[in-house]
Amino acid sequence: MVTDAVPTTSGPVVGTEQAAVRAFKGIPFAIARRFARATPPRAWIEPRECTDYGAYAPQPGHLDHADETACLSLNIWTPAGADRPLPVLVFIHGGAFVTGGGADYDGAFLAKHGPAVIVTINYRLGPLGFLQLHRHGLGEANNLAMSDALAALDWVHANIANFGGDPDAITLSGQSAGASMVIALATLPQAKGKFIRALALSAPGRNIMSADHADEVAARVLAELELADEPGAIASVPLPKLFAAVERVGRRLADETESGTVFGPVLDGTVIPREPRDVFADGTLRDIPLWLGSCRDEMVMFLKSTPPAAMIRTTERQVRAALGDAGWERLLAYYRATARTEEDPYEALLSDAFWHRPMADLARLHAAAGGAVWLSRFDHRPALEPFLSQGPTHGADNACLWAHLPNFIDRPILKRKGGPMTPADIDVAARFQASLLRFVTSGAPDVAEAWPRFELAQEPLAIFGQPFHIVPLNEGVRSRLWAELSAGINDKKKMREAG
């Protein structure tokens, strides 16, 4: 059934209604020329039909379905007939900053069971969203994807009341690359007052990229395209050629630079003026409740990719650089000695180094500054590939979060099919979804007795598995060894500085 028209700042839109949930898909919140900042879309007068997802952002595997000027759209699911303004969840998808889109996340089930208003967005990906060209004569081309996300947040804040949402009760959320963007967005002055809570699932260890490294990436891409002397010509390079050049550069960066990272939010001094962790540490965000989550076996998916993902090599290099080769070998020996049945000690070490420990460090910063923060780990293996064969690896929590119980949903952009859930899947997913909706509604994912907030004295870690339970974060010899090795490095650093 088609809905009545809903007014927006650009013009009226109509969607569809099914099972007491209204869906509005593909609403344009901005338009953009290549390597230029997004601007508001051209206004319309007649009701615009928003019943199908908008164009994908250009990305590998979907360049033929993409529209780089009109990919900036969002999707809204809202319960029909709500008698009060509902809390709002704005979700920023992941995909290593190069793939994905809002069409992979159907929010109807969460909207109905909240009740809440669910919003998913598209933003520019890969070189179109993250290639920093302002030092090469293209003045506007910095942090464009971040600016896209800010434009979407502005649109939601200005319009969501017309869809039954409360603009003063917006939770900013994201997974993987989207979680990195959430952590950075949350700290920006431009976002202040436009959200009240934040959720980051599986944020990579390094949430921000230096301007110098971003400049090196751009220089390498221009050189690969033989445009070092004519950088402006990149604006007309065909998309397949541009993305192929980026892929080649990325493979080399993994071996030749310390971080190996190609794209991500950049500390450019303009869009992102400060290191996000410093903003959390100084208490600027102490009034923002924060939930940080990860999956137990994050790195399995990346180890099993062909070839193994670049972050595998770069993470090992970074740990060796920080702790020394002897420290690395000592860590790996302890992981081998304490490995669970079927656990890969190498993977577990890398998961801790790249995912779990940085998330815990951010939780400590927020807690120390007086902020409310909750920390979780997803230990359940969904009965859905790739998790069925790889365990609770990267994205396992996200698959359960967006499930329409009793089924996993299809992911058209990722080209992953859904399917029926097991009783264990349903049990864990229901708990995870209930925690999310409670967080969106109240600012806490559970009652304090069941899931205490993260405090420096106790540091509780919630485990989503069967059963749901709480464990001390720093339990076991692995954590103690990390602390010992890190303390040794810090002591040596202080001695050098004092000498």
Image (cartoon, rainbow, N blue to C red):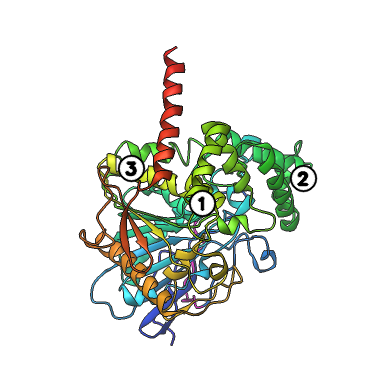
Q: In the image, is residue 41 part of the stretch drawn in magenta?
A: yes
Residue 348 marker: 1
Residues shaded magenta: 40-51
Q: Residues within 10 Å of mark 3 (few under 14, many from 20)?
A: many
Cα separation, mark 2 vs mark 3, equals: 44 Å
Q: Is residue 368 visible?
A: yes
User: As drawn, is 364 to the left or to the right of 1?
Assistant: left
Residue located beneath label 2 in the image: 225
Dot 3 amino acid type: Arg
Q: Secondary structure at mark 2?
A: loop
Q: Quadrant of residue 461?
A: bottom left
Q: Position of residue 465 (x, y in %)?
A: 38, 66
Q: Quadrant of residue 313?
A: top right
Residue 364 marker: 3
Q: Residue furthest bottom?
A: 1
Residue drawn at (24%, 55%) of the image: 452
User: As drawn, is 100 to the left or to the right of 479?
Assistant: right
